[in-house]
Amino acid sequence: MNGYALYRKAWRFEGAPHCETRLKEKEWKALLQQGGLLVRNTYNFDCQEETSFWYVIKDQFEGLENLPSRVRNKIRHAFNSFEYRLIPFDTLKENGYQIIQETYADYAVHDREMNQKVFMEYLDQCQKQHFDYWGIFDKETQQMVGFCTVTLWDQCCEYGVTGILSKYKKGSYYPYYGLYQYLNQHYLEKQQFKYVSDSARTITEHSQIQEYLIQNFNFRKAYCQLEVHYRWWMKLAVKMLYPFRKIIPLQRVKAILNMEAMQRGEK
């Protein structure tokens, strides 16, 4: 079905979140006939009702003066230390793996594998869609020390994989503060996009980036409806394991059960 792609054995919509509609039974069944274990369907984007699932978005740009003073200071430190600029795909391909490898090593929850093969497969997928690639460069050495990928749609975008070398996360560098201020200004003010997104609510809880964006850059929750459709045997497995979701140690299983809890409005 157009608009959906398999990601880690789950069908997900590839377009802008406001464009996704509720799937009919014949539609999600057709997807499962092609493979995969489940279909994630979100719809009624940015509804007025507070639901248990959302996208983290920002739909207007504020200058530095409208951000908390602690955030302004960290952004200034970052701009003194780093340059943020668009880079060619080949630059990311050549320099990105070491950066993302160190980034994943710092995560509190290791829910997915990250090796060179996985990273190159991700880059291959990027080539099939519309992406911007941003590099973060140390002003003194001109070394590329971080990057961010951005999925582009019509008048909106989604911030994707972001990585920073470990040494620059410490001290008074604050590279993330500069990055998100720069990206927000580029897409919301200069490009006049309707909104930027940091994707849907995380089900793996491997990163605190969404809460960071809400607290520091005035991102907000755009509530929506969530439905998850499973293969028949997968549905049975989820039903059996659901009561034990808080004690199951396997992160991939736990992530699916977390999403089921969100679908039920229990998380």
Image (tube, rainbow, N blue to C red):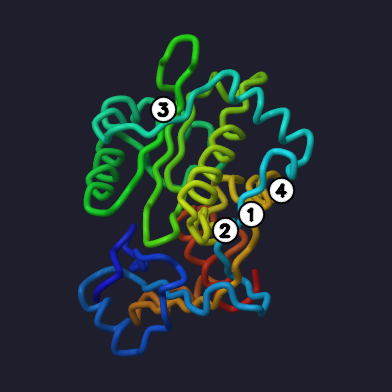
Q: What residue is shown with label 3?
A: 99
Q: From the viewer's perspective, is 101 left or right of 245? A: left
Q: Which is more toward the observer, 232 or 133?
A: 133
Res 266 quadrant in image? bottom right
Question: In front of the other: label 3 or label 2?
Answer: 2
Q: Earlier in the sequence, mark 1 or mark 3?
A: 3
Kindly check if marks 4 and 2 are in contact, taking CB atoms under 8 A apart as contact: no
> SS of the residue at dot 4?
helix
Tell which of 243 and 133 is nearer to you.
133
- Residue on which disc 2 sits: 57
> How many residues crowd around disc 3 within 10 Å: few (fewer than 14), some, or many (20 or more)?
some
Q: Tag on residue 219?
A: 1
**Which of the numbered marks, if any, corresponds to residue 215?**
4
Q: Position of residue 1 (x, y in %)?
A: 24, 76
Residue shown at 43%/75% (left/top)? Answer: 41
Q: CA distance from mark 3 to mark 2?
A: 26 Å
For label 1, the SS is loop
Q: Amino acid at mark 3?
A: Ile
User: In the image, what residue type sits under mark 1?
Assistant: Phe
Quarter that holds the C terminus: bottom right
Residue at 43%, 38% (x, y): give it: 148
Q: Nearer the viewer, residue 223 or 83?
A: 83
Q: Which is nearer the N-term, disc 3 or disc 2?
A: 2
Q: Is residue 254 visible?
A: no
**Residue 147 appears left or right of 61:** left
- Residue 115 visible (yes or no): yes
CA distance separating discs 1 and 3: 26 Å
Residue 256 image position (x, y, % from top left): 47, 65
